[in-house]
Image (cartoon, rainbow, N blue to C red):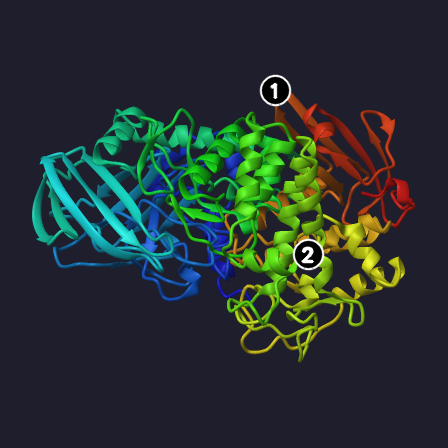
């Protein structure tokens, strides 16, 4: 079934190879990074980045292959074996390809544009990537700081000359070159820039590459390609490449500040230390080493983005395309339609120190483009996906106390929600989105996403005592009820005359051309995470709601030839491979049946996450797919997009210690835990009996212990209405 299994096992078990041993020696034996397997998700539809980076770094330097289709969105797929270079920027887990900027490729002759390679010759771990190439005979090693890529090339003794191709035309996926330039400033310094358009419409990448040995230009193709020869290859050749979205001067400043010396081994060690510091924020206790590897790899994947998008000077390129100076760290790569669900709530727990800058980034984006980010990349608004997810994420930060200027945050949320774009003009006119008035389709998905975002805005309005705003956005947030058909018990498209869209097939999905987004009626009927009890009340009875929910995990049907490939990881019609389904399992807690959630949670974690190339059931989606696993495996998940109510599930681990900052930890203990004992029998919070099936953010961040007694049969714990979320 998995054609690369043998190769995977060989690569996963061989963490050191010949010349990589020197760099590997700096790794601590019991480091958390030892449990990370970066190969997970490089096959199938995972689309993950493979290469060297540090947590939340701008530079993600790694191998770039030709783009052969959708599965090359990150620039790399395990099924391929031809490299076009080692780019300094990559995406991870997206459904659209871009970046791949500033490609370096050691070549055997001036006309070479690519090289074949064997995956058996690759070594990778957090912060370090290595590969032995045959043509030319060179051992390539890569590491990184936040804004600098560091290369070390060790040429074979039989190699007569060493050359490097610097390709400024090279890009990934939708990326399209617009203009570029080189400047040979000295025999050991080449600078330049690349401007491109693609998913992000106006991308600027400036670079400053410093060489450990002098180079001489052997060939140049206009302003796009330069081939240089190294003067001395008798010892390893090293290259430091600083990048910036602002200027060559800032790229140089980044290079000087972050990597002033040439100690490659120390830089690898620093990257490893950076990863261990972040990975160590959650310590898990388990006898299952495979589960431990899946967990820490998932945690690793959640920290590829958002990416730092300001220079050490404080300069950054804003959403208006202009250069700004800030006293905060600016970020980019916000896949918010995905990450508002679990990745950002996870960040509020283990990266509280970053929330102030995240919020500042959101507010400056608002000032520069007139609305909160939707899907921001390289300082550009892509407007990808539906809804107003930036409001949900910002509201969550406000409600959890991370935002100082709450009035400015509310103004940004309100203004963004009142624009006449992206179908919101129809929402204001009708109270819902009529399918016959919206030429961009997807009205149910858009309407439900807007409703949950409006609920987040309403909560902030209530916090600030804005009664009129609270009432307005609260009422709008209940607009999801317009789409619910009480006869079929599905969310359906509705026309301007109030009639439901016909013909109707709850299984069918037509990608971007029906009432849903990457899904069908079976999957979207549950997208009311902000008002689960309100959704339950739309059904004839709670019993009928439960029966419908039970059916979701059993029924099967033909989605049609035009369904999105994102609809994957199916259990019945539950599609774990795509984000709109991620909260659904936890709905059982809201209706007093947490044991059903427990069974399905364990099934999902066991059957849809693997220690394998094809180890994810869908796109990684910039950390969301992995964040779901991280949160669910420690037994907590935030269903409501904002406010910090975490539902208790079925933890995989005997114990999980979460460093919540300020020297405090929150521990989840699962006594008598096993593959059979998946049901919570009783609970204690800080030594006192605890009957509720949820915790609040404040309960967690002040530190403490949640102790769960596990058993092999469902119990009455959490079944009473007063103990439900």
Q: Which mark is residue 527?
A: 2
Q: Nearer the viewer, residue 84 or 255?
A: 255
Residue 90, position as x, y percentages in the image: 38, 48
Measure the alpha-carbon separation of dots 1 and 2. Answer: 35 Å
* The residue positioned farthest toward the bottom in the image shown: 503
| Helix, strand or loop status at disc 2 | loop
Residue 631, position as x, y percentages in the image: 65, 42
Residue 408, position as x, y percentages in the image: 53, 32
Residue 16, quarter of picture: top left
Image position of 275 with respect to 297: above or below: above
Q: Is residue 561 left or right of residue 135?
A: right
Q: Which mark is residue 662?
A: 1
Q: Is residue 32 left or right of residue 60?
A: right
Is residue 287 at least partly visible in the picture?
Answer: no
Image position of 710 with respect to 108: above or below: above
Q: Nearer the viewer, residue 292 or 98?
A: 98
| Helix, strand or loop status at disc 1 | loop
Looking at marks 1 and 2 on the same chain, the residue that comes earlier in the sequence is marked by 2
Of labels 1 and 2, the one closer to you: 2
Image position of 338 with respect to 644: above or below: below
Q: Quadrant of the C terminus?
A: top right
Tell me which residue sits at (58%, 51%) in the image: 625
Residue 55, position as x, y percentages in the image: 46, 36
Residue 273, quarter of picture: top left
Is residue 513 at least partly visible in the picture?
Answer: yes
Q: Residues within 10 Å of mark 2 (few under 14, many from 20)?
A: many
């Amino acid at each position: 079934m998995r054609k690369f299994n043998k190769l995977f096992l060989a690569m996963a078990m061989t963490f050191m190879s010949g010349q990589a041993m020197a760099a590997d020696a700096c790794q601590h034996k019991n480091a958390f990074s030892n449990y990370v397997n970066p190969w997970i998700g490089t096959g199938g539809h995972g689309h993950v980045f493979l290469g060297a980076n540090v947590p939340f770094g701008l530079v993600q330097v790694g191998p770039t292959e030709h783009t052969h289709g959708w599965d090359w969105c990150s620039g790399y797929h395990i099924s391929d074996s031809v490299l076009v270079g080692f780019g300094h920027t990559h995406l991870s887990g997206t459904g659209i390809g871009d970046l791949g900027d500033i490609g370096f490729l050691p070549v055997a002759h001036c006309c070479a544009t690519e090289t074949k390679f064997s995956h058996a010759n690759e070594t990778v771990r957090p912060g370090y990537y290595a590969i032995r190439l045959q043509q030319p005979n060179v051992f390539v090693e890569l590491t990184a700081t936040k804004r600098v890529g560091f290369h070390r090339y060790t040429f074979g003794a039989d190699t007569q000359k060493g050359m490097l191709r610097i390709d400024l035309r090279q890009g990934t996926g939708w990326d399209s070159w617009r203009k570029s330039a080189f400047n040979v400033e000295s025999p050991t310094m080449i600078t330049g820039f690349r401007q491109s358009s693609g998913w992000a419409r106006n991308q600027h990448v400036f670079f400053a590459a410093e060489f450990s040995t002098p180079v001489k230009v052997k060939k140049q193709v206009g302003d796009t390609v330069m081939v240089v020869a190294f003067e001395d290859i008798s010892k390893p050749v090293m290259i430091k490449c600083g990048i910036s979205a602002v200027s060559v001067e800032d790229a140089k400043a980044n290079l000087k500040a972050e990597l002033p010396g040439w100690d490659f081994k120390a830089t690898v060690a620093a990257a490893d230390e950076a990863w261990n510091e972040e990975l160590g924020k959650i310590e898990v206790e388990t006898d299952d080493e495979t589960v431990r590897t899946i967990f820490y790899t998932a945690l690793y994947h959640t920290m590829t983005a958002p990416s730092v998008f300001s220079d050490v000077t404080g300069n950054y390129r804003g959403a208006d395309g202009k250069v700004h100076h800030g006293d905060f760290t600016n970020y980019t790569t916000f896949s918010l339609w995905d990450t508002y669900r679990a990745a950002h709530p996870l960040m509020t727990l283990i990266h509280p120190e970053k929330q102030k800058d995240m919020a500042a980034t959101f507010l400056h984006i608002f000032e520069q483009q007139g609305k909160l980010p939707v899907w921001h990349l390289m300082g550009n608004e892509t407007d990808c996906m539906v809804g107003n997810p930036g409001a949900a994420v910002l509201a969550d930060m406000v409600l959890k106390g991370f935002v100082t200027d709450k009035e400015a945050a509310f103004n940004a949320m309100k203004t963004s929600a009142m624009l006449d774009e992206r179908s919101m003009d129809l929402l204001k006119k009708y109270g819902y989105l009529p399918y016959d008035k919206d030429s961009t389709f997807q009205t149910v998905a858009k309407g439900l996403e807007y409703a949950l975002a409006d609920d987040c805005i309403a909560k902030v309005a209530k916090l600030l005592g804005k009664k009129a705003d609270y009432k307005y956005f609260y009422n709008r947030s209940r607009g999801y009820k317009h789409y619910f058909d009480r006869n079929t018990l599905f969310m359906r498209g509705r026309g301007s005359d109030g009639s439901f869209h016909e013909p109707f097939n709850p299984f069918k999905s037509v990608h971007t051309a029906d009432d849903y987004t990457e899904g069908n009626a079976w999957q979207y009927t549950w997208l009311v995470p902000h008002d689960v009890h309100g959704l339950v009340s739309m059904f004839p009875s709670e019993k009928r709601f439960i029966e419908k929910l039970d059916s979701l995990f059993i029924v099967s049907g033909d989605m049609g030839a035009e369904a999105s490939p994102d609809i994957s990881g199916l259990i019945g019609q539950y599609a774990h491979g795509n984000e709109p389904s991620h909260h659904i399992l936890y709905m059982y807690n809201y209706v007093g049946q947490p044991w059903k959630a427990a069974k399905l949670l364990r099934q999902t974690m066991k059957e849809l996450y693997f220690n394998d190339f094809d180890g994810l059931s869908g796109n990684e989606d910039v950390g969301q797919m992995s964040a779901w696993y991280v949160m669910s495996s420690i037994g907590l998940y935030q269903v409501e997009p904002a406010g910090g109510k975490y539902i208790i599930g079925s933890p995989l681990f005997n114990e999980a210690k979460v460093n919540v900052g300020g020297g405090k930890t929150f521990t989840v203990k699962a006594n008598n835990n096993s593959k059979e004992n998946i049901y919570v029998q009783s609970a204690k919070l800080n030594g006192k009996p605890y009957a509720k099936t949820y915790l609040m953010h404040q309960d967690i961040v002040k530190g403490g212990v949640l102790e769960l007694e596990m058993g092999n049969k469902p119990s009455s714990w959490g079944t009473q209405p007063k103990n439900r979320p």
